[in-house]
Amino acid sequence: MLKEILLIILGFVLLIKGADLFVDAATSIAKKFGLSEMLIGLTIVAIGTSLPEILVTITSSTNNHSDLIIGNAIGSCICNSLLVIGIISLVRPIKLDKRIVNRHLPIGMGAMALLMFLGNTNKLGPSQTITRWQGFILIICAFFYIIYSIYEEKKLQNKKVTEEMIDYVESKEHKSIIKIIFFLIIGIIGLKFGADFVVDNSVLIATRFGFSERFIGMTIIALGTALPEIITGIIAAKNDETDLLLGNISGSNILNLCLLIGLGAIINPLTFSFDFNISILVLILVTLFLQLIAVINIKSELDRKRGIILILVYIYYILCII
C-alpha cells in the first residue's frame, strides 16, 4: 500500500516537472522558428499545462480503463471550478471578466451538454459507450475552440498577455539547440513514466480496497493533476493578476472534456457510466453559479465568502462520491 502511494506521488512529480520541461523546450524551439509570443502562449503553453492529463488519458485508454479517463476529465473540471477557484479567492478576490462570463463559460456549458448527449446515445451491451467517431467530434470541437481563442485574443490585442509571454519566452531564448532537445527528451520521459506510475498504482489501490476507477479518477488523479493550476493560481493571486484566471480555468475545462475524452475514445471506445451524468450536472450548476455572481455583483468579483462556499461544496461532493 505504502509503495503504491509513494509511486503515485512520484508519478505526479514526474508529470508536473516533465510538462514544465516540455513546455520550456517547445517554447524555445517555437521562438527559434519565429512564432509569435501570443501564438506560443495560446497553443504550446496552454496545451502543455494539460499534458499530465493527456498522458494519463493515453495510458489509461491503452489499458482499457474507461472510468479512469472520464472520471479524471470530469473530476479535474469540478476540482478546477470549485476547489481551485475557491482556494485562490481566499488569497485575493477573483475578477470575473465579462468576456469570459458571456462567451467562454457558455461554450463550456455547451461542451458539458455535448458530452452528456454523446455519452447517452450509444448503448452497447449493458452500458453506454462513447465511440471513436464521437471521439473525433469532441476532438474537432477542441480544435475549433483553440482556433476561436487564438482569433479572439489576436482581435483584442491583449497587451498584458503579449508582454508576459515575451518575458516568459525571452528567458529561454538563449539556450543552445542541444540543451533544448535534451530537456525536451527528459520532459517526454518524465511524462511517460509519470503517467504509468499514476495510472498503474491507482488501479492497484482501487482494486485492493474495492474503490471504483471512477472514484480514483475523480478524486486522487483529479486532485494531483490540478496541483499546477492551484500553485500557479495562488502565485497569480498574490501578484494581483487574477484577470485571466477564470478564462484559463474555463479553457482548461473545455479541453479536458473535449480533448481528453475525445482522445481516449479514439484510442479505445469508452464506457460511459450513468453516474457521470450527475457529475456533469454539478459542473453545469457551478458554471451557472459563477455567471450569476458576475451578474449580481457590481464589482464582478468572486470574494472570499463565495470562495468558501465553493470549497465546502467540493468537500460535500467528494463525501457524496465516497
Image: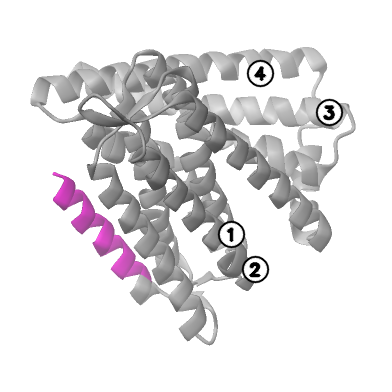
Which residue is pictured at 62% across the width and 60% down the height? 244
| Label pair 1/2, CB-CB below 8 angstroms | yes
Q: Is residue 79 above or below residue 316?
A: above
Q: Secondary structure at mark 4?
A: helix
Mark 3, mark 4: which one is toward the viewer?
A: 4
Of helix, strand and loop, which mostly describes the magenta segment? helix
- Residue at which label 1 appears: 104
Spatial CA distance of label 3 from label 4 is 15 Å
- Residue at which label 3 appears: 174
Q: Of the numbered discs in the image, which one, if any, rests on residue 184?
A: 4
For marks 4 and 2 on the same chain, the one whose residue lies earlier in the sequence: 2
Check the picture and name the quadrant holding the N terminus: top left
Q: x, y percentage for residue 284?
A: 39, 59
Spatial CA distance of label 4 from label 1 is 32 Å
Mark 2, mark 3: which one is toward the viewer?
A: 2
Which residue is pictured at 63% across the width and 13% down the height? 185
